[in-house]
């Protein structure tokens, strides 16, 4: 039986089709690069929808106050109740009751931004999706490296 | 809203997933946001598994166990040290240029995610 990996987004505002068939000769590294290319896309969409769930302008302003802290202090801060209050305050009206569902993601968003703002990882490689694999240069340049 | 959906399917032997979000009238932005995170989590996990197949990152992890007992500030300093860079490069002798560079960063992300997952902190969107 053929092994395949397919990602399809067929929505009014976003269309994407990524398909891979694992045929003889396809290496683990090829699959890894393909999956990371899906991560790049999903990460971009996650950030887009995050902007519809919370007021990113006010949230970014609040979390920027944490960026001058050292990493240990920063991690403590995002686990305090004060951080939850910042998230709650920034949630758009229709999602005010969904704090628990989005809190961990907002911690990741803030942590990600902290690392990028402080240039903690060389070439901003804070996640697999940020790594410039040779076969994905075009996609990354289009989506990430703006 | 005719047949709008998002779908991720994998039938790879050790990576089976089938997640579909058909858009309905009640589907909102939070549902779509959560769906993307729900596919990113297994994808990211399997990328780690593939990396373990491609390179001996487990050995890298074992020879750097001391990193996992450091605080966050010291850990990040060590992860970006020339000593750690040398250890990673030892795994990459058969690779060249751009691929070597990409795998170098992937090894660092692998250790970065291992360290912070133990602290229930995730520098990328893949756990909810």
Image (tube, coloured by chain):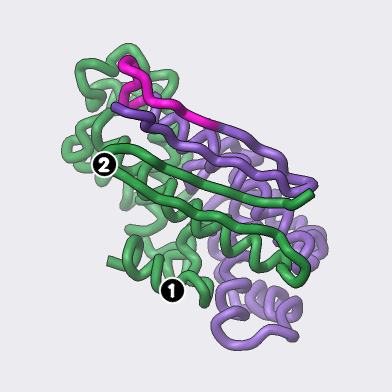
Chain colours: A green, B purple
Residue A118 spot, x, y in % from top left: 36, 60
Residue B75 appears anywhere in the view = no
Q: Can you say which quadrant of the picture contains the C terminus of chain A?
A: bottom left
Q: For mark 1, name the chain.
A: A
Q: Quadrant of residue A61?
A: top left
Q: Of the numbered discs in the image, which one, if any, rests on residue A13?
A: 2
Relative depth, front residue between A89 and A127: A127
Circle 1 or circle 2, nearest the eye: 2
Mark 1 crowdedness (10 Å alpha carbons): few <14, some 14-19, many ≥20: few
Left or right of residue B126, residue B46 in this image: right
Q: Residue at x 66, y 40 (%)?
A: B118
Which residue appears at 36% of the width and 17% of the height? A98
Residue at the extreme top of the image, as rendered: A97
The span from disc 1 to disc 2 (Cα, nearest Å) is 24 Å
Q: What span is colored magenta in the figure?
A: B20-30
Left or right of B58 on screen, residue B47: left
Which of A84 and B123 lies nearest the eye of the viewer? B123
Which residue is label 1 attached to? A137
């Amino acid at each position: 039986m053929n092994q395949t990996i397919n990602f399809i987004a067929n929505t009014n505002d976003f269309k994407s089709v990524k398909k891979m068939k694992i045929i003889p000769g396809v290496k683990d590294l090829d699959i890894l690069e393909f999956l990371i290319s899906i991560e790049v896309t999903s990460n971009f969409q996650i950030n887009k929808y995050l902007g519809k769930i919370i007021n990113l302008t006010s949230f970014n302003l609040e979390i920027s106050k944490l960026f001058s802290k050292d990493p240990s202090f920063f991690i403590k801060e995002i686990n305090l109740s004060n951080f939850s209050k910042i998230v709650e305050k920034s949630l758009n009206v229709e999602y005010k009751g969904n704090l628990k569902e989005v809190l961990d993601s907002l911690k990741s968003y803030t942590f990600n931004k902290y690392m990028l703002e402080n240039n903690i990882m060389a070439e901003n490689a804070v996640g697999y999706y940020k790594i410039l694999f040779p076969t994905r240069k075009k996609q990354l340049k289009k989506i990430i490296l703006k | 809203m005719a047949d709008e959906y998002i779908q991720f399917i994998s039938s790879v032997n050790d990576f089976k997933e089938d997640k579909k979000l058909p858009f309905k009238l009640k589907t909102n932005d939070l549902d779509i946001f959560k769906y993307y995170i729900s596919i990113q989590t297994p994808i990211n996990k399997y990328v780690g598994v593939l990396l373990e197949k491609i390179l001996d990152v487990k050995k890298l992890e074992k020879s750097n166990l001391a990193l996992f007992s450091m605080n966050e500030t010291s850990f990040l300093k060590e992860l970006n040290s020339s000593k750690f860079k040398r250890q990673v490069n030892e795994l990459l002798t058969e690779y060249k240029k751009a691929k070597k560079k990409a795998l170098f960063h992937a090894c660092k992300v692998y250790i970065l995610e291992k360290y912070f997952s133990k602290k229930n902190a995730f520098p990328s969107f893949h756990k909810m």
